[in-house]
Image: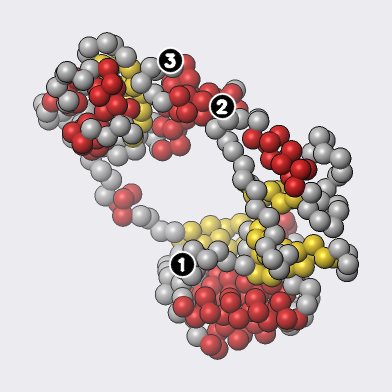
Amino acid sequence: MNQTSQIPKLYGRYIDDIIYGPIELQINNSNINIIQSAFNSIESVIQFTVEKPGPDGYLPFLDFQIKIDYNDKQIKYKWYNKNIHSGNTLNKLSSVPSHIKNNFLSNRFIEVKRRCNNKIDEIESFEKITNILSMNGYTHKEISRAKSNCSKNRNKNQYNYKTSLHNLKPLKLPFVNNKCITKIIKAIRKYELPINIVSTLGTKLCQLYPMKEYKSCQCTICLQITNQYNCNSRFVVYKFTCKACNKEYIGETCIAIKDRIKQHTNSINKGDSKSALSNHLLLEHPNSNYSITNFKLDIISRHKDSIDTALCEAFTIRKFKPALNRKFELSIYNLYGQLHN
């Protein structure tokens, strides 16, 4: 922005979304192009696009459409959903505590009422939210109650002990049913305990019945790797080495290694050029037998979850720079490694 002639009137950022408003009445395309070029020059694999206001002057940003009214010197808001939005949201039948659903309904309307500057935009936004909530099983009575809650001034002395969330100690409890959690909350309020109930999910089926990794079954995959791993090993970083030219490919998988190899095998059998292994055989060994057996498999490491596995793969690729990994993969992992040094 230092390259432009004027400082923007509006600048905001939320994760990967940036909103920029020029100080002049008409958008200066040259300034916008300069800013876009500056952002895109930082890293070639991360490119920004520009979205300009529509004919009505509104620009979509997150859950709202925003318009800078230079005459009234204010920012106008309207609630917004993309055209491709499916309409799915927190469903009435979902296994979530009822008080969370009630807060969810009220917060939809509170946010609109807090943002919208005029009654017309507010009514239009309320209608859109009402339609989506109705699609997700909420009754007209529940939606009307949520609308009325956002207009009421709640009694400030209703919960004297609840002066600030910072003063409350979180108590995590597994969610069983609404009746149980309601009784606990009533008891906490009755005795004015400085506790904030946080409902957590119960034990998942995958935790009760984890995927077992049996001993080596002496299959072709188990015979290639050491006794420490087998064809059912998950969350691993692996390496394929071409038997003809010794070029390497490094990857990771959170599913069983045998299932990941099946995916590589299918790509090779189809001659898929998007696959690094298949493309290598097509370009550099066209006269060879198109088979996964052209590569030697090694397991580099094993990890506890998908995040650790992805991190290890990134640093391993950055360290060894395998020839068969694509250039854009190398650029991303180099950048990722630099950010975490």
Q: Is residue 256 above or below residue 127?
A: above
On the picture, is 70 further left or further right than 124? right
Circle 2: residue type: Leu
Numbered mark located on residue 320 in the image: 3
Q: How far separated are the C-alphas under marks 1 and 3?
A: 43 Å
Crowd around label 1: few <14 · some 14–19 · many ≥20 (10 Å): few
Question: Which amino acid lies under the numbered mark 3 shown in the image of this protein?
Answer: Phe
Q: Left or right of 50: which side holds 200? A: left
Quadrant of res 7: top right
Q: Secondary structure at mark 2?
A: helix
- In which image quadrant can residue 273 be found? top left
Observer able to see residue 190: no
- Dots 3, 2 in contact, CB < 8 A: no
Q: Which residue is mark 1?
A: 86
249 up-or-down from 102: above or below: above
- Residue 263 on image: x %, y %: 25, 37
Residue in view at x 75 percent, y 47 percent: 29
The answer to whether residue 253 of the structure is visible from this angle is: yes
Of all residues, the one furthest to the left in this rendering is 218
Q: Are marks 2 and 1 in contact (CB under 8 Å)?
A: no
Q: CA distance from mark 2 to mark 1?
A: 34 Å
Say if 96 sits above or below 263 in the image: below
As drawn, the residue found furthest toward the bottom would be: 141
- Which quadrant is home to the C terminus? top right
Crowding at dot 2, Cα within 10 Å, few <14 / some 14-19 / many 20+, comes out as some
Q: Which mark is residue 77?
A: none
Label 3 environment density (alpha carbons within 10 Å; few <14, some 14–19, many ≥20): few
Q: Assign the N terminus to one quadrant of the image.
A: top right
Point 86% across, 52% down: residue: 23
**Which comes sooner in the sequence, label 2 or label 1?**
1
In the picture, residue 277 is in which quadrant?
A: top left
Residue on which disc 2 sits: 335
